[in-house]
Each structure stands twice: as C-alpha cells, then as structure tokens.
Image: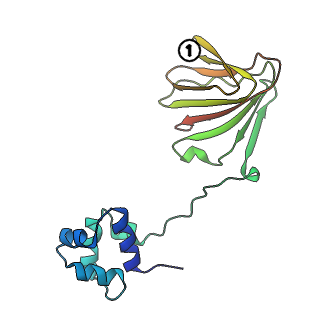
C-alpha cells in the first residue's frame, strides 16, 4: 500500500529529528500547515513541497522515487560456490553480487595443504574469522598461525593469501572491503 505525501513527509521529518514546529520555522510556514499536510488534510503546492524537502535534505526526485527492495537475508540456495582443485580451496559467496556493496563476505574452505590464490595489494581492508581448523596467514613476507576462534584484520597494502598446513580442513569467514574476490 502506497503512503500519501503527508505521511511520507512526516516520516522524513522524524528521520531528521525535527518537530513540526522546527520544520515549519525552517520553511517559514506555520506549524498548523505542516500538521495539516502530514494528516492529509491539505496538499502543498509544488513550490512549497520543494521548500519543505530542501529543509529536510531531500529533493522531489528522491522523494517520489520508490526505494528498491533490497534483500537483507540470504539463504543457503543463494550461495554461489567455486573451487580450485589444484590449490585445494572452495569459496562460497554467501551474499550474491556483493561486489556492488562496500564489503564482500565469503566462506573459504581449505583442504590440508591447500591455499588460496595470492591477492595483490589494493586500497582496502581484510577481515577473517577461523571457524574450523588452523590456517597460516601470509601478508607480505610475514606469516601468522590463526586457529579456530581467532581472527585477523589488516589493511591490504601488501600481497596476501591463506594456507592450510594442518592435518584437517580449515574454514574461514573472510570479508574484504571494498570487494576484492
């Protein structure tokens, strides 16, 4: 069900933490007029609506553009999987098309003696949480053992990759920002 202009203006006003009186003052209108518009008892002229929206940090275009329904919950069937048998890893992209977002989460499963591809430096950040097994994190010329329950976080200013030198598979929740997988 579509909401009316008045209700939409009220929601925008509340998101801006303004009272009707504060909005009216900024727009050089009366509090009573703002109240009537919000209750759908009167409609503002286009010029007045533009003024109100400007005071609320919006525009006609933004105000009348319906927000796109964005998926917030992703299910097992949404996962895209790829693997590299030679290197011994499997990647699950748990948020499809995340490359358009500011971060990209994946789950990496490394077989024993497996490793990821080496990622080149880029202007971003990397986070990982080991959910099973143990991995070796290689960043530049240094390396660290990261066990189940441990995490890592670094700026991707040097080449990096993960390796599994343990005797069991390892699983890592891995997030890059911006997306880099």
| Looking at the image, residue 20 lies above or below residue 33 | above
**Which of the colour schemes (rainbow, by chain, secondary structure, one colour) is used?**
rainbow
Which quadrant, please, contains the N terminus? Answer: bottom right
Direction from residue 151 to residue 24 in the image, left or right: left
Direction from residue 142 to residue 82 in the image, left or right: right
Residue at 64% x, 25% y is 150
| Whole-percent x, y for residue 95 in the image | 65, 47
Q: Work out whether residue 36 or residue 48 is closer to the camera in this orientation and state it.
A: 36
Which quadrant, please, contains the C terminus? Answer: top right
Q: Work out whether residue 140 or residue 16 is closer to the camera in this orientation and state it.
A: 16
| Whole-percent x, y for residue 96 in the image | 66, 48
Residue denoted by label 1: 140
Q: Residue furthest toward the top?
A: 141
Q: Residues within 10 Å of mark 1 (few under 14, many from 20)?
A: some
| Looking at the image, residue 83 lies above or below residue 164 | below
| Looking at the image, residue 159 lies above or below residue 24 | above
Q: Work out whether residue 115 or residue 9 is closer to the camera in this orientation and state it.
A: 9
**Residue 180 in view, yes or no:** no
| Whole-percent x, y for residue 157 in the image | 49, 22
Direction from residue 13 to residue 51 in the image, left or right: left
**Residue 16 in view, yes or no:** yes
| Whole-percent x, y for residue 44 in the image | 28, 82
Direction from residue 116 to residue 42 in the image, left or right: left
Numbered disc 1: secondary structure: loop
Residue at 29% x, 80% y is 35
Residue at 34% x, 89% y is 41
């Amino acid at each position: 069900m579509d909401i009316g202009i008045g209700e939409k203006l009220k929601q925008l006003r509340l998101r801006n933490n303004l009272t009707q009186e504060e909005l009216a003052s900024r727009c050089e209108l009366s509090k009573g007029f703002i109240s009537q518009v919000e209750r759908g008892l009167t409609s503002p002229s286009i010029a007045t609506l533009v003024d109100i929206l400007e005071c609320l940090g919006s525009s006609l275009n933004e105000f009348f553009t319906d927000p796109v329904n964005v998926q917030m919950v992703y299910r097992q069937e949404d996962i895209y999987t790829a693997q590299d048998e030679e290197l011994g890893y499997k990647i699950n992209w748990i948020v499809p098309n995340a490359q358009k977002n500011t971060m990209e989460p994946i789950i990496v499963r490394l077989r024993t003696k497996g490793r990821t591809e080496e990622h080149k430096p880029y202007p971003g950040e990397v986070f990982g949480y080991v959910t099973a097994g143990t991995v070796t994190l290689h960043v530049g010329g240094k390396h660290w053992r990261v066990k189940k329950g441990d995490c890592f976080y670094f700026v991707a200013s040097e080449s990096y990759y993960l390796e599994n030198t343990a005797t069991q598979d390892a699983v890592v929740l891995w997030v890059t920002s911006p997306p880099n997988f």
